[in-house]
């Protein structure tokens, strides 16, 4: 599918083969105006736009009508036999009341009328086909699809589809039933968003202004991922202030809207998947949420999954480029006076950092794990024991003891590799220190360079780390092994995966699901992770 967008530097622009387009930028930059332009100028597909300013008043009762008429009222704001008139004039004049940028959208009643009419008509069709003995009829209605998806997003509630009305009940409590019009703003917003998207024609472009409205951060991404999966035939255009939501879209084109120049002209920039300029981040963050920079990517990183669950009050932003990007961004943002109202932190792996470096980073709001890399956290005995108990596996003490022995054995088999890594880090730091030592003359610079070899002491450093590693092995210092072992093979070699009969990724995802579940019983593993993240934070629930 192709989506036409406004001219850029005098040239026509068209976005092809993307599941979604994200418009992002500061308030007043012209995002909504651009969405109106997209709605008007993509006649090759039906375009359905949902305004940020909309009524979420669900009617208590709904009368079914004619299916085509009710759908036209939903899509155009009015019904008419003249289809050309509907396409050319009705949407602007009736759905948007001649003010497409600012009109308060009020189509919840039209949506419910269409859904109830479709429900009623399918019931009649099913009855007729059933009488004729036909069995291959797809009887699932849009309301049934909405119910299934709505309950996946809100598993503690159930929707009841009744004649001319929607009712809601808590799970396992059929006595506490109330009308859908009494749902919370968030519950009605979820129903509305799902219903609108499921009700538009095939191969449409759907524009959603502020998809985060009335939705909790914890369900925002899940909801729109699920909706997109239901309508893979459609293309989605989002207008958002949420950096986290913008970066969560897969196969998406991000447009950074900088300024509206008037006369359907914008100053904007097309961003690549990895590109999110600091100036854009500063512009859209405002004072909305504290920031936590972590290593990795948005779709494959353990870091963002774990830290998003542990630090729900933060906007967790993964940075490609590893620890250096986290350090650089955290320092840069904390140095800006305009960011004084935000808490900006970073978390990095320990790798081969010494205590002096760790203490220095902590003063800069950069926290270093107490283990060499994030995967080692999943070998903490308290975490493993919790999983074993959760799965009702016996002999936990013996399993943990064997795991510790395997970790020590792995380090012993890789001591030369690990000592070499520490030596390489030592050499790199020494060389950088000499290179960065500013010289006033060419003679002084030459002297600095020629002195490098004599100051490195490569073999001495290697022997020093061999001795340190051998001491950890001799003392069976399991936690010491976790602190220095940088190798992705450590977790598979620990033996715990064999006990569980799981692959590494499944085990990690299982633990992450436990961390994400907001249950008091899981606080023990959340606090264990927090302790080794070195951030001096602890989950304490009010009694």
Image: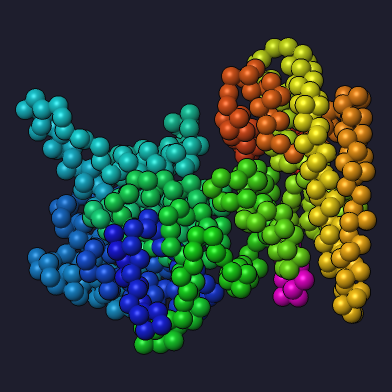
Q: Residue furthest left?
A: 132
Q: Residue furthest top?
A: 395
Q: Is residue 2 visible?
A: yes
Q: Tell me, what colour scheme is on the image?
A: rainbow
Vertical order, 463 against 107 (above or below): above
In the image, residue 444 lies at what x, y percent? 92, 74
In the image, residue 499 lies at what x, y percent? 65, 17
In the image, residue 301 lies at what x, y percent? 60, 45
The picture quadrant where one finds residue 281 is bottom right
476 part of magenta stretch: no
Q: Is 436 positioned to the left or the right of 506 in the image?
A: right
In the image, residue 135 lies at what x, y percent? 14, 26
- Nearer to the camera, 483 or 279: 483
Q: Is 140 positioned to the left or the right of 127 in the image?
A: right
Q: Which residue corresponds to the image point at 32% horizontal and 77% vertical from the top-left?
A: 12
Q: What stretch is highlighted in magenta?
A: 334-344
Q: Which residue corresponds to the image point at 81% horizontal and 50% vertical from the top-left?
A: 425
Q: Is 64 positioned to the left or the right of 53 in the image?
A: left
Q: Which residue corresponds to the image point at 80% horizontal and 41% vertical from the top-left?
A: 420
Q: Is 447 positioned to the left or the right of 71 in the image?
A: right
The quadrant in which the C terminus is found is top right
């Amino acid at each position: 599918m192709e989506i036409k967008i406004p001219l850029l530097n005098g040239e026509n622009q068209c976005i092809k083969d993307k599941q979604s387009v994200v418009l992002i930028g500061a308030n007043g930059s012209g995002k909504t105006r651009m969405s109106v332009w997209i709605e008007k100028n993509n006649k090759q597909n039906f375009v359905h736009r949902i305004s940020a300013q909309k009524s979420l008043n669900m009617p208590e009762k709904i009368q079914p009508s004619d299916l085509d008429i009710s759908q036209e009222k939903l899509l155009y704001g009015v019904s008419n036999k003249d289809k050309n008139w509907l396409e050319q004039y009705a949407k602007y004049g009736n759905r948007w009341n001649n003010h497409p940028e600012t009109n308060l959208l009020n189509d919840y009643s039209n949506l419910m009328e269409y859904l109830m009419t479709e429900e009623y008509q399918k019931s009649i069709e099913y009855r007729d086909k059933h009488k004729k003995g036909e069995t291959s009829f797809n009887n699932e209605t849009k309301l049934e699809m909405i119910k299934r998806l709505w309950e996946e997003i809100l598993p503690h509630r159930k929707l009841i589809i009744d004649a001319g009305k929607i009712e809601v009940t808590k799970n396992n409590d059929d006595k506490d039933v109330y009308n859908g019009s009494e749902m919370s703003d968030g519950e009605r917003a979820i129903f509305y968003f799902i219903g609108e998207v499921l009700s538009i024609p095939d191969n449409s472009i759907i524009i959603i202004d502020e998809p985060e409205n009335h939705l909790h951060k914890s369900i925002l991404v899940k909801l729109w991922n699920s909706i997109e999966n239901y309508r893979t035939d459609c293309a989605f255009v989002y207008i958002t202030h949420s950096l986290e939501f913008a970066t969560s879209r897969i196969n998406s084109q991000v447009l950074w809207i900088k300024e509206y120049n008037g006369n359907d002209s914008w100053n904007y920039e097309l961003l690549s998947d990895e590109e999110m300029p600091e100036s854009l981040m500063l512009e859209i963050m405002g004072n909305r949420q504290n920031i936590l920079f972590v290593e990795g990517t948005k779709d494959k990183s353990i870091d963002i999954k774990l830290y998003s669950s542990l630090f729900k009050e933060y906007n967790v932003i993964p940075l490609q480029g590893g620890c250096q990007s986290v350090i650089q961004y955290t320092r840069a943002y904390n140095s800006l006076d305009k960011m004084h109202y935000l808490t900006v932190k970073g978390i990095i792996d320990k790798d081969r950092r010494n205590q002096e470096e760790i203490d220095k980073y902590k003063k800069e709001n950069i926290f270093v794990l107490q283990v060499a890399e994030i995967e080692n956290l999943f070998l903490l005995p308290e975490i493993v024991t919790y999983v074993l108990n959760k799965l009702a596996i016996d002999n936990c003490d013996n399993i943990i003891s064997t795991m510790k022995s395997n970790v020590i054995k792995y380090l012993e088999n890789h001591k030369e590799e690990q000592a070499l890594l520490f030596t390489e880090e030592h050499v790199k730091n020494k060389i950088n220190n000499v290179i960065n030592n500013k010289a006033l003359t060419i003679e002084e610079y030459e002297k600095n360079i020629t002195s490098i070899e004599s100051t490195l002491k490569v073999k001495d450093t290697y022997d020093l780390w061999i001795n340190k590693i051998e001491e950890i092995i001799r003392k069976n210092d399991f936690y010491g092994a976790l602190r220095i072992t940088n190798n992705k093979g450590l977790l598979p070699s620990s033996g715990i995966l064999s006990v569980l009969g799981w692959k590494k990724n499944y085990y990690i995802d299982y633990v992450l699901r436990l961390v994400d579940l907001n249950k008091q019983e899981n606080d023990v593993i959340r606090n264990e992770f927090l302790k080794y993240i070195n951030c001096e934070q602890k989950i304490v629930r009010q009694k």
